[in-house]
């Protein structure tokens, strides 16, 4: 499995080998030793969601039980994003993004204390992810998906039809997030 570093330290793209022929394909989606070599904590929870075109989920993070996430798309196509929200980080407010789909089978690792979100580009998408800690709803926080200070370059093909939850629509800009609701950078 090829591992590609992004401009944000710790945010990684995993590019597996896909073996395909007339019958279909085979791909290894997880290898613990590759994650361990990269310093990724063990995973404790798997999740899956299905969304339709234009659904945008995020940008979410957990303060008390931060989750690292290894995300992939089992069916469909999404644009996936990680944003550094750690106070004091040299890359605070910066983002990295990647297209994830059921053709390349790329995966994206979003470390703990980074905000995460995605938008669906296909008719539907099944989004699968492994988490390094359990979901803790009381400590969930977020920033608004279109924060101009962060400047995420979302694909234009869905911008006029983004579907958001009420919670995501009401999320604050990063500069307006309360300091105690932001994780602290620890080099």
Image (cartoon, rainbow, N blue to C red):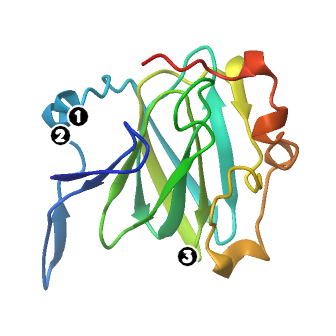
Measured as percent of width and height from the top left, residue 51 is found at 62, 61
Q: State if disc 2 and disc 3 touch (CB < 8 Å).
A: no
How many callouts does the rendering have?
Answer: 3
The structure residue drawn at horizontal position 62% and vertical position 62%, both measured from the top left corner, is 119
Secondary structure found at label 2: loop
**Residue in the foreground of this view, choosing between 45 and 3:** 3
| Labels 3 and 2: the sequence-earlier one | 2
Percent across and percent down for residue 138 are 73, 18
> At numbered mark 1, what does the secondary structure look like: helix, strand or loop?
helix
Separation of residues labelled 3 and 1 (CA atoms): 29 Å
Side of 53 relative to 99 (left or right): right
Q: Which mark is residue 9?
A: none
- Up the image or down, 108 lies above or below 92; here it is below
Provide residue 87's location: percent of width, then percent of height. 63, 24
Left or right: where does residue 30 sit relative to residue 111?
A: left
Residue drawn at (23%, 43%) of the image: 30
Secondary structure of the residue carrying tag 3 is loop
Q: Residue at x 67, y 44 (%)?
A: 59
Q: Nearer the viewer, residue 28 or 100?
A: 100
What residue is shown at x 79% (from left), y 56% (from top)? 164
Q: Which residue is mark 2?
A: 31
Q: Residue at the front extreme? A: 90
| Residue pointed to by mark 3 | 122
Q: Quadrant of residue 156?
A: bottom right
Residue placed under numbered mark 1 in the picture: 35
Q: Of the residues tagged 1 and 2, which is closer to the observer?
A: 1
Residue 168 at x, y percent in the picture = 79, 46
Crowding around mark 1 (Cα neighbors within 10 Å: few <14, some 14 to 19, many 20+) is some
Residue 45 versus residue 96 in the image, above or below: above
Q: Along the polypeptide, which appears first: circle 3 or circle 1?
A: 1
């Amino acid at each position: 499995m090829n591992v590609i570093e992004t401009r944000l330290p710790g945010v990684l793209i995993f590019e597996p080998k896909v073996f395909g022929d007339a019958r279909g394909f085979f791909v290894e989606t997880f290898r613990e030793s590759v994650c361990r070599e990269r310093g990724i904590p063990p995973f404790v929870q798997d999740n899956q969601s299905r969304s339709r075109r234009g659904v945008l989920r995020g940008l979410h993070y957990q303060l008390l039980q931060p989750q690292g996430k290894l995300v992939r798309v089992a069916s469909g196509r999404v644009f996936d994003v990680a944003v550094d929200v750690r106070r004091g980080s040299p890359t605070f407010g910066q983002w990295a993004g990647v297209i994830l789909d059921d053709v390349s089978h790329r995966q994206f690792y979003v470390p703990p204390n980074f905000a995460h979100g995605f938008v669906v580009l296909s008719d539907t998408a099944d989004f699968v992810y492994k988490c390094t800690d359990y979901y803790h709803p009381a400590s969930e926080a977020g920033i608004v998906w279109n924060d101009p200070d962060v400047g995420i370059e979302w694909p234009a093909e869905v911008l006029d039809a983004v579907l958001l939850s009420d919670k995501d629509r009401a999320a604050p800009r990063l500069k307006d997030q309360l300091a105690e609701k932001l994780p602290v950078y620890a080099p």
